[in-house]
Amino acid sequence: MNTSASGTPDPAIDSAFVRRWLSLATSAIEHKSSWLTELDSAIGDADHGTNMQRGFAAASAAVEREPSNTPGEVLTHVGRQLISSVGGAAGPLYGTLLRRAGKALGDQPAVTPEELCVALRSGVDSVAQLGRSERGDKTMLDSLYPAVEAMEFALSSGSGLLAALAAARTAADEGAAATVPILARRGRASYLGERSIGHQDPGATSAALLIAAFAEAAEAV
């Protein structure tokens, strides 16, 4: 087990870690559901919070019923559930993110921080491909790409999992906030043209909540 700069041991990245992430993510989405829907009411269909809450509740229940033995299996299972239970574009996008990340992790019972980072990068790239989007389009990618890049930089600089995920959380939060002045170029918000300026993107916001849950999962050992 690696040790962070503060002397705190890094947790194992196993199925228990990912289930802990899922529990924290589900709680965060439930707690922030009204806020996500409020953000979506300004530039979307006013259902992002409701859809995400329903999807993560279904995913949590499914994982509880059918426990998976590896981190890759858990992520893949969650991704499948989100695709089937989250309405709008969020289901396929988040489902693709987690299924691709799970596939990248393979069937290893535990993975390294670097392997988790590579898997998340693979998932984020798949979202960009599916949505035909890039950073700066006012989407979830405006949180996800900064988060992955911050994690990559921290790990390459010798940081452990705790510090790398803390950096990812900060970058994701900053990325979500930075969508406020952006003109939307993809999704429902793009139909509003310049009226999309001045509003924080709900997808980038929910993505930041999921990244924060990874950081909290590492801290909650």
Image (spheres, grey):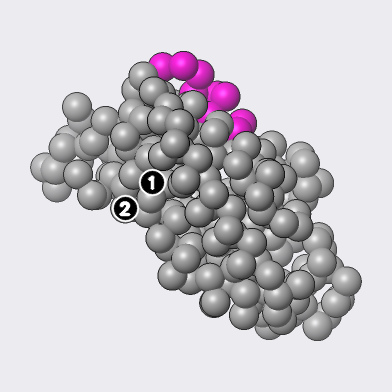
Residue 46 in picture, x, y percent from top left: 70, 75
| Residue 147 visible in the current orientation | yes
Is 11 placed left or right of 151 in the picture?
left
View extreme (left): residue = 7
- Is 32 located above or below residue 8 in the figure? below
Task: Residue at 45% x, 31% y: name it.
Answer: 66
Residue 2 in picture, x, y percent from top left: 20, 30
Query: Of helix, strand and loop, which one carries label 1?
Result: helix
Say the numbered circle drawn on residue 75: none
Q: Is residue 104 magenta?
A: yes
Q: Look at discs 1 and 2 and give the one toward the viewer.
A: 1
- Is 44 located above or below residue 164 in the figure? below
Q: Which is nearer the eye, 189 or 50?
A: 50
Tag 2 or tag 1, which sits nearer the N-term? 1
Task: Residue at 52% x, 45% y: name it.
Answer: 59
**The disc labelled 2 sits on which kind of residue?**
Glu
Which corner quadrant of the image does residue 189 belong to?
bottom right
In the image, the segment drawn in magenta is: 97-108
Q: Is residue 204 magenta?
A: no
Is 81 placed left or right of 16 in the picture?
right
Which corner quadrant of the image does residue 40 belong to?
bottom right
Instruction: Give the residue number, with chain letter if any, for mark 2.
Output: 216
Instruction: Give the residue number, with chain letter if any, for mark 1.
Output: 21
